[in-house]
Image (cartoon, rainbow, N blue to C red):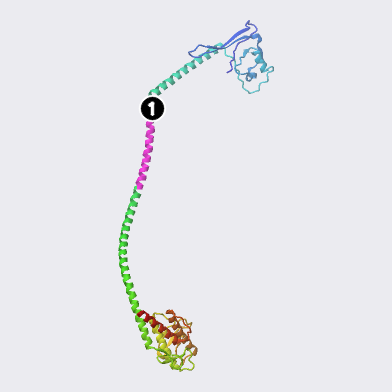
Amino acid sequence: MNTNANHALTSACGLLQLIIRIWRVEPKSTPVALLEWDVDFRAMRYLCKKMSVAQSLFPAGTLLFAARDGYYTAPDIAARVHCEEEPAIKPNVSTVQRKSYDFIKAVGLLEKHREICRVQDQIAKLVETIQEKLAKDGPLMEKTRLKGERQSRTIQLQARLQACSTHVERARHELDALSDRASAKRTAIQTYGQRLRDNVLLYEQLSTELTTTRALLKYTNEDVQRLERRRLSTMRLIYPIEQASTISSIFTICDTRLPNSMFADCKPEVVATALGYTCHLANMIAYYLRVPVKFPMVAMCSRSYVIDPLAIDPSQSTYPLYAKGQDVARYEYGVFLLNKNIEQLLISQGLSVIDIRNTLPNLRWLLDTIKDRQCRADR
């Protein structure tokens, strides 16, 4: 704060010295002297004519004296300021000139300071009253504050409770739905369990029946096989295959000679009859052995024939087993198909063919093997 003392200096008066005292006055306390200065006006140093020139060059707390011819201060302060020449004041620049207070203004300032102190005292009393009021009504206000907070907390908890209740209700509905589904599944499981138990009992009954049926089927198959062997033995007696008395390499069937696929020097009708017997005997053996031959045979005595299902032309799939009035190649191919059927019968019984052209020897070997197996089974 800059403090200026305002005094009028004139050369006419005899006032050359002045004592300046600055006091600090506080409410309810004794005034305290801050500064006492014995001023000798003869030692004052001139500064300038206008205060606007050098007002910003003084440090805080500088005392200036305003006279008619200008402003004065202490020599040491004037030496630091250096305001020998006054610069020209710029136009349109507002300047503020601060002068020292006179006695009347100082007394007015002191009254304002005292009024400010009184206001501060009133404010302090008001603050003290408010604090006493707060101290007195503090518990009630704290309770009111706590009540507001608890009401807010209660509203929040009620909202959460409502949300939880909605969630619990939804979960209860879902639980009821799941319970219904579980009950339905439990009923279905019980139903299927009862069905399973019934099926287990039925399975046990059927297993027993199946065991009995298998045993019966086994005995029946054995009887059938035994009967088939007997029938084959009977067929062996019906169609006896013997070795010719004159030529050992030729066999006869029902006393009818049948060479081994070489019929050049034989009578066609005799050969046709022997092939018919052979065709019928092979058919009966296939029937009793339950072997489906690849090439079906039709036995018609001396006019028998064989069918080739793999023939390209269905109209040419029949091959005769007689040579009269037939193509020799087709006749020989028919005999070949008959021999293939006999080979298939041998393979079905686990026998191998040495020469497929030996029609009657192969057939007799098959019958002898079946008879031997029958004899071993009867034992």
Foreground residue among 8 and 360: 360
Identify the residue shown where x is 32% and y is 62%.
196
Query: Is 282 placed above or below 199 here?
Result: below
Q: Please say whether residue 275 is visible from this viewpoint.
A: yes
The C terminus lies in which quarter of the figure?
Answer: bottom left
Query: Is 158 placed above or below 208 here?
Result: above
Tell me where residue 41 sits by quadrant: top right
Foreground residue among 255 and 192: 255
Identify the residue shown where x is 36% and y is 41%.
162
Judged from this view, the residue extending furthest toward the top is 14
Q: Is residue 154 found inside the magenta-colored segment of the image? A: yes
Foreground residue among 162 and 295: 295
Identify the residue shown where x is 44% and y is 18%.
125
Tell me where residue 126 sits by quadrant: top left
The image position of residue 86, as x and y in percent, is 68, 18
Query: Is 277 placed above or below 126 here?
Result: below
The image position of residue 335, as x and y in percent, is 46, 87
Name the residue beneath numbered marker 1. Answer: 141
Query: Is 294 placed above or below 74 here?
Result: below
Q: Main secondary structure of the magenta part?
A: helix
The image position of residue 299, as x and y in percent, is 40, 87
Tell me where residue 254 sits by quadrant: bottom left
The range drawn in magenta is: 146-171
